[in-house]
Amino acid sequence: MGIQWSRAFRQPQTYLLLLGTGLGCALLLNLAGPRPLVWAGGGAIATTMVASWLAGWRPPANPPLSGDLLDRQSFIQHLESLSQGFPSRPESTWRQAYTWALESQAFAHQIYQRDPLLQVDLLEALHTVVDLARQVAEGLAVVEQVQTPTYRQLAQQRLTASCDRLQATRAQLQQLQDQVTLASLDPETGSGSLLPQGLQTLIAANRDILERNHPGQ
């Protein structure tokens, strides 16, 4: 509560309220005179107004996440939101999935820098990467909660499938990044023409796992 109040005092609205309250008290004293009853009444009114404002104040909501996943910080924000949303999970498994996702974004960004025409496909691919990371976070939470052996095994299988696909995505994007680098150095190789098809194949494979793990969504 102390942290919230300290943040409230830094808000422009709070400064305006305090300024308005001070001017009101000064006007009241000027009109009614500096008598003890006026001082007490004005102070009580001012205190009530400020206390009501602080009691009703709520910190602003977190800003919406940016959809530009080719931007490094925006991508990290998406992953961090998953970290906060599913705090209960084996740290080593999540950190590995986190690393695969980050490296996938780095390769996608490098591809985009060399071939901006692939922006739409790359963004679509990175959205599936975020969804796979979400499935990993969800899967880790479910595996910890489910006690029945049969359902726990099913949850573990889905978690493994998401992790494996995330790792494969990272490897495929690295290969595509190497292809676009080679194509920029030697256009006659024709490897650049395979990039859109490679990205669509990657996206289709990711969506297949996403749908298998959450059928009907």
Image (cartoon, helix red, strand yellow):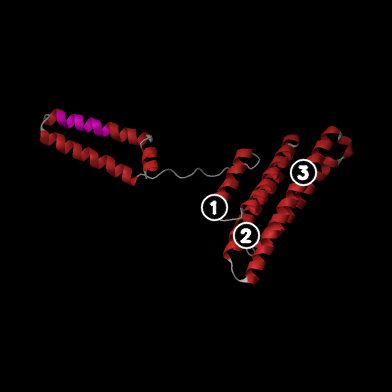
Tag shown at residue 142: none
165 shown above or below 5: below
Residue 31 on image: x %, y % = 13, 29
**In-front residue for pair 28/116:** 28
Label 3: which residue? 174
Residue 85: mark: 1
Three-letter amino acid code at the position of disc 1: Gly
- Specify the principal SS of the magenta part: helix
Regarding residue 206, the answer to whether it shows in the image is: no
- Report if residue 149 lies within the magenta region: no
Position of 155 compared to 168: left or right? left
Callout in the foreground (2, 3): 2
User: How far apart are labels 2 and 3 at the CA level?
Assistant: 26 Å
Q: Earlier in the sequence, mark 2 or mark 1?
A: 1
Q: Residue at x 64, y 43 (%)?
A: 69
Q: Are marks 2 and 1 in contact (CB under 8 Å)?
A: no
Q: Position of residue 141 (x, y in %)?
A: 58, 59
Q: CA distance from mark 2 to mark 1?
A: 13 Å
Callout 3 secondary element: helix
Tell me the residue at 37%/34% (across/down).
12
Q: Is residue 100 above or below residue 217?
A: above
- Look at the image and give the residue range highlighted in magenta: 20-29
Secondary element under disc 1, as helix, strand or loop, is helix
Q: Amino acid at mark 2?
A: Gly
SS of the residue under disc 2:
helix
What's the residue type where badge 3 is placed?
Answer: Gln
168 vs 83, left or right, is right
Residue under numbered circle 2: 139
Residue 176 at x, y percent in the picture:
79, 43
